[in-house]
Amino acid sequence: MRFYSTRNKNVCVSGAEAVCRGISEEGGLFVPSAFPQITETQLRALCDEEYESLAAFVIGAFLPELREQLPDYCRKAYAKFESDPPAVAPLVKLDDNLCVLELWHGPTCAFKDVALTLLPYLLDGAKRATGNTRTTLIPVATSGDTGKAALEGFRNVNGAAVAVFYPDGGVSDLQRLQMITTDGDNVFVSAIKGNFDDAQTAVKKAFTDESLKAELLGRGIELSSANSINFGRLAPQIAYYFSAYCDLLSSEQIEYGDKVDFVVPSGNFGDILAGYYARKMGLPVGKLICASNTNNVLCDFIKTGTYDIRREFHKTSSPSMDILISSNLERLLFDVSGENDKSTAQRMAALKSEGVYSLTPREHAEITAIFDAGFATEEEVAETIANYFDEYGYIIDPHTAVAACVAAQVNGGERTRPTVILSTASPHKFAASVLTAIGEKPVRDELKNLQNLEDVTALEAPASLISLPEKEKLFTGSIALTEVNDALRAFAAKIAKTRA
Ligand SMILES: *Cc1c(COP(=O)(O)O)cnc(C)c1O
């Protein structure tokens, strides 16, 4: 299986190489040159497997060079999820034709764990497969959840180091505490003065800074990415679409071949793109419904065919979706343009210089045949949390609530097909917002909020969150956007010293 860059198809590498590099040199993203097809027999067989084996099969279809090790990698990675009952991606039935796929039972209580517990193993395997002995330095821009999941995944992993940059004032208190209390000699965390888009742009710049890269190479260090621009992040996410379908099949809620709609709370477009890739592999997916918060640039794009970031940026109760520049959309653009690297590169350049680009009518029609979209206001998010608690006795976080709200909007509110809402964070991770939504009064002390939410909902708060307020705050700095590369230089020097 070969992978090429969305901005230059002549850049063509193996899957292992794509995982090591994270992003292509000219700024393009690596995409598979073909999509492996899953037959009915294979899909039915997957339904009898445990999640770990199912994931190994799906990921191995894209990364055959790691196929042998993948079952072991998946077992080790997913051992970090709640195990009683086993819960990487449990499907919870709420109503006829309505299910929730809970993706937040991992170590940091958000769906990013599904990919980021596995990525260190994928990276290690990919480096072995390509004979790469350098240390991998991973700069991460985070809107809140990727940062902690990457820190947790790579903490104390040999041959790798992580530097996380989060928007100052742009993440929840718990998200911030999770990140700045991480220990380990290969981790660095800093706030950055700007929003997530600024942080992501600043971090992406490091990848094209030749002098920085040369200096790092002199120390035996190379850069890679753990953001969802890395195909190694996407591949594990494709697996849970298959697992959800299998669960519906096994519980006889559908018959083989029935189409299922998925509603995905979207920010950087990685999660929903994984669903698109699952569909391309032959999974019977009906509509992929893209749910936005008030930063509704993706929703507008799907409805109109024009991507326009010339708008106000809102801070919302679903901070992990407070994004205007959705990196992974580039992969969809490339696909619907007939894999046209020139037009993809041009559109990305237009986005950078003018803040806007448009699809052709043919491309837009192709997208609306598969995708639908909607957005939820802050009031609607709170209402949805309250309604789900009333109606189903089921408590959801604000990100999941965005999707739940949009699920009720599309199709004139009528559910024609079995619908799966992707639940991306534990409600406890956003305890203050959830408490407000259900009519309780949150306080400043997050620990109290966690306990209060536990009392009101009878849903146990994750131990990893309860212990946070007592932990030592190890990283309290905040830097300017222009200081990212210097911070990386200083961190690289420290890593080189500890390694020596
Ligand atoms: C990252 C994140 C999202 C958005 O996922 P994308 O892949 O960036 O679209 C939604 N919800 C939560 C809780 C997240 O952490």
Image (cartoon, helix red, strand yellow):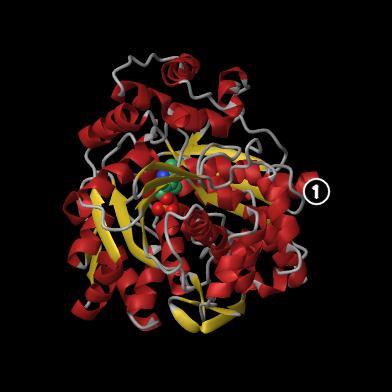
Asked if the beta carbon under badge 1 is closer than 8 A to the nearest atom of ligand 1, the reply is no
Residue 240 x %, y %: 52, 56
In the image, what residue occupies the spot 71% across and 69% down?
67
Q: Residue at x 75, y 54 (%)?
A: 159
- Res. 266 visible in picture: no
Extreme right residue here? Answer: 500
Indicate left or right for 389 with 475 as reference: left
Task: Please give the name of the residue rendered at 72% of the width and 52% of the height, measured from the top-left corner.
Answer: 75
172 or 447, nearer to the observer? 447
Count of marks placed on residues: 1
Residue 66 drawn at (x, y percent): 71, 69
Where residue 473 sits, quadrant-wise, is top right
Screen quadrant of the N terminus: bottom right
| Local SS, label 1 | helix
Is residue 328 shown above or below 296?
below
Q: Is residue 71 above or below residue 141?
A: below
User: Residue tagged by mark 1?
Assistant: 499
Q: In the rendered image, is residue 224 in sight?
A: yes
Amino acid type, label 1: Arg
Position of 185 with respect to 257 (left or right) is right
Neighbourhood count class around disc 1 (C-alpha, 10 Å): few under 14, some 14–19, many 20 upward: few
Q: Residue at image x 24%, y 63%?
A: 302
Is 212 on the left or on the right of 159, as rendered?
left
Q: Quadrant of residue 2?
A: bottom right
**Residue closest to the eye, 238 or 179:** 238
Report x, y in % for residue 459. Answer: 49, 24
* Image location of residue 28, percent across then percent down: 46, 71
Left or right: 194, with 183 as reference point: left
